[in-house]
Amino acid sequence: GTSDEKATAMRILASEIISTDPQTYDQATLGMSPANYVHVVTDPQQWGGGIELQVFSRHFEMEITAFDYHFLREDIFGQGGGYKKRAYLIYTGDHYDVMTWRDDQKGGSVQKTFSPKDLLAWQRARDLIQSLHSEASKNGRCKLQSQWRREIKKRTKNQQNSFKGGSG
């Protein structure tokens, strides 16, 4: 199906799992009532993040490594779960994309999952994220990072302006 159909299916899957497991996905975990959360996660204009990645990690019995190239952040969902597969995702600031590699040794097939023990795949993913980060930084496209740096600079300047110094 189309990517919209796949996204809808994933939203429905997450909502079903969350609504049928109130012990795991309670208000404290979700930050809102499970009913409200299910409503939000099924809205095509909204999408979740870490909670859904945890849901998918458990459901598909695989580790999911999510990279945010704006901040060079790496989160691994399902780590320590004994899973035999791992997928790598890129968070663009708006949504997640699956990282794939073409495997020339397997007739050029596209590979989406890897062994968690495959350090070469992990390093390739990290190298790609570093490259995307460097390119985006040079071109001023690391919007989240730029906003964060401006906010830090503003807060630091405000703190310096309000600091009187001296000894008590």
Image (tube, helix red, strand yellow):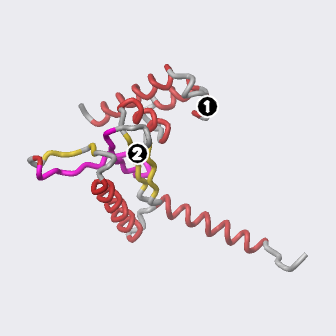
Up-down relation of residue 105 to residue 145 (above or below): above
For image coordinates 39% across by 29% down, the residue present is 59
Q: Residues within 10 Å of mark 2 (few under 14, many from 20)?
A: few
Lower position in the chain sequence, tag 2 or tag 1? 1
SS state under label 1:
loop
How many marks do you count on the picture? Answer: 2
Distance from Cα at disc 2 to Cα at disc 1: 21 Å
Q: Which residue is mark 1?
A: 32
Q: Nearer the viewer, residue 31 or 149?
A: 31
Which kind of residue does numbered mark 2 sit on? His
Q: Which residues are magenta?
A: 84-105
Quarter of image, res 137:
bottom left
- Image location of residue 30, percent across then percent down: 57, 33
Task: Identify the residue at the far left of this view.
Answer: 107
- Image location of residue 96, percent across then percent down: 38, 45
- Image location of residue 53, percent across then percent down: 43, 38
Task: Identify the residue at the far right of this view.
Answer: 168
Q: Is residue 73 left or right of residue 115?
A: right
Up-down relation of residue 95 to residue 32 (above or below): below
**Residue 97 lies in the magenta-colored region:** yes
For image coordinates 67% across by 66% down, the residue present is 155
Q: Nearer the viewer, residue 106 or 41?
A: 106
Up-down relation of residue 108 to residue 44 (above or below): below
Q: Image quadrant for the N terminus?
A: top left
Q: Nearer the viewer, residue 111 or 5?
A: 111
Q: Which residue is mark 2?
A: 95
Which kind of residue does numbered mark 1 sit on? Met
- Image location of residue 166, percent across then percent down: 85, 80
SS state under label 2:
loop
